[in-house]
Image (tube, grey):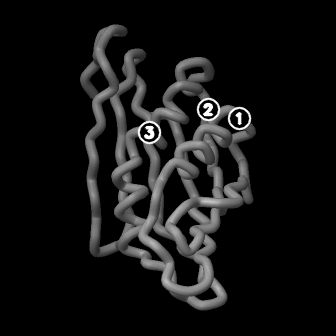
Amino acid sequence: MPRLNETAALRFAVRIALASSVFSFSSYAANGRTALVTTPPAVAPSPTDNCDKADISGKIRVMAGALHHCYAAELAKNHQLAGKIVVEWTIQTDGRVNGEKTVTDTMGNPAVARCLMATIASIRFQKVETGICVIQWPFVFSPG
């Protein structure tokens, strides 16, 4: 694994495995450690089951760098930081996020959870034609 000097920006190598509907990415941090995130799309069925899974996965992929930064910032303070955070949110009819919350947190780092929720809250998803769409998405982080 190549090392970067402390002034180097984080570099992201993105691998998307569409066949398995799983994507992961890693970054080479300034301290030479690699942080790995594996994020399987986990769209919980809504009462009307009108969630656009492709739009949701695509938007999460677009925000992968920002979501990873939530973890990388705290990993720099604690090199053993690892765990799974499941975030739940609702996509309203206008595509805005509402009611974001942590469902599971084995990491125990509130700063990472808050950052993930704030990042997700900033995303504008495709409009939902009828009803709402409830999502639960697991983010699994571990130092390399």
Report helix, strand or loop for mark 3.
helix
The answer to whether the residues at label 2 and label 1 have Cβ atoms under 8 Å apart is yes
> Which residue corresponds to mark 3?
66
Point 48% across, 53% down: residue: 123
Relative placement, left or right, of 99 versus 124 is right
- When the figure is inspected, residue 142 is found, relative to residue 4, above or below; the finding is below
Residue flagged by tag 1: what amino acid is it?
Asn
- When the figure is inspected, residue 33 is found, relative to residue 66, above or below; the finding is above
Is tag 1's residue or tag 3's residue first in the polypeptide sequence?
A: 3
How many residues crowd around disc 3 within 10 Å: few (fewer than 14), some, or many (20 or more)?
Answer: some
Q: Nearer the viewer, residue 90 or 81?
A: 90
Is tag 2's residue or tag 1's residue first in the polypeptide sequence?
A: 2
What's the CA distance linking mark 3 and mark 2? 18 Å
Give the image quarter of residue 141: top right
Q: Residue 95: x and y, percent?
A: 50, 67
Residue flagged by tag 2: what amino acid is it?
Leu
> Which residue corresponds to mark 2?
81
Front disc: 1 or 3:
3
- When the figure is inspected, residue 34 is found, relative to residue 134, above or below; the finding is above
Is tag 3's residue or tag 2's residue first in the polypeptide sequence?
A: 3
Report helix, strand or loop for mark 1.
loop
What's the CA distance linking mark 2 and mark 1? 8 Å
Relative placement, left or right, of 51 versus 33 is right
How many residues crowd around disc 1 within 10 Å: few (fewer than 14), some, or many (20 or more)?
Answer: some
Point 36% across, 59% down: residue: 23
Q: Residue 11: x and y, percent?
A: 28, 30
Point 73% across, 59% down: residue: 103
Point 27% across, 53% down: residue: 15
Which quadrant, please, contains the N terminus? top left
> Which residue corresponds to mark 1?
109
Q: Residue 29: x and y, percent?
A: 39, 23
Relative placement, left or right, of 131 versus 16 is right
